[in-house]
Image (cartoon, helix red, strand yellow):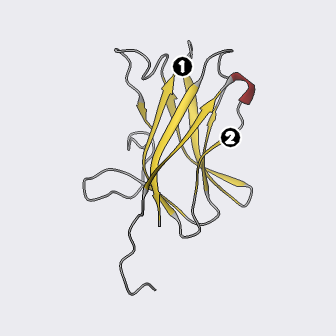
Amino acid sequence: MATQPVFVGTPKNGKVQIANADASNQKTVVTAASGGSKVVSLNAVSTDTSARDVQVSITNGGTSYPIGTLAVPIGAGNTGTVISVNMLNPQYITGLPLDADGNQYILLVSGDTLTVAAQTTVTTAKLITVVAIYGDF
């Protein structure tokens, strides 16, 4: 047990794009540090002309553990009328811990990766971009 408090270090961001060629394969957004990592933001933007469901998972040791699936609307975050998708929204992923401001976050342990996967293939020449803001312990 630590005798001193442990805080998240330098802020980082992880980013990945899901393209047609990725089909429904998982893409890594964050790889946890040896001391663990804390993901405080996870957002999706889409240029796709079709809405897509995107699954968020924690993967460790080759096994994927889905924590939620979210709908990413047509053009999410890519137009002035459709906002980007907050993938840590408690309406879609429940049971995550809350910070002092009431925002959900994800804790990853050494060996974890945070992955995303479109549940159906993205339209040719279109992308779903997922960006995470996180820090390592």
Which of the two labelled residues, at mark 2 and mark 1, occupies the earlier sequence position? 2
Residue found at x 39% / y 41%: 89
Residue found at x 39% / y 87%: 3
Question: On the image, numbered disc 2 is attached to which residue?
Answer: 26
Q: Is residue 119 above or below residue 12?
A: above
Residue 39 position within the rendered picture, expressed as x and y whole percent measured from the top left: 45, 53
Q: Amino acid at mark 2?
A: Gln
Question: On the image, numbered disc 1 is attached to which residue?
Answer: 51
The answer for how far apart the CA atoms under marks 2 and 1 are is 18 Å
The picture quadrant where one finds residue 18 is top right
Residue found at x 69% / y 15%: 124
Q: Residue furthest front?
A: 10
Residue found at x 59% / y 37%: 16
* Left or right: 1 in relation to 19: left
Residue 81 position within the rendered picture, expressed as x and y whole percent measured from the top left: 34, 14
* Mark 1 neighbour class, 10 Å CA radius: few under 14, some 14 to 19, many 20 or more: some
Residue 13 position within the rendered picture, expressed as x and y whole percent measured from the top left: 48, 46
Q: Amino acid at mark 1?
A: Ala
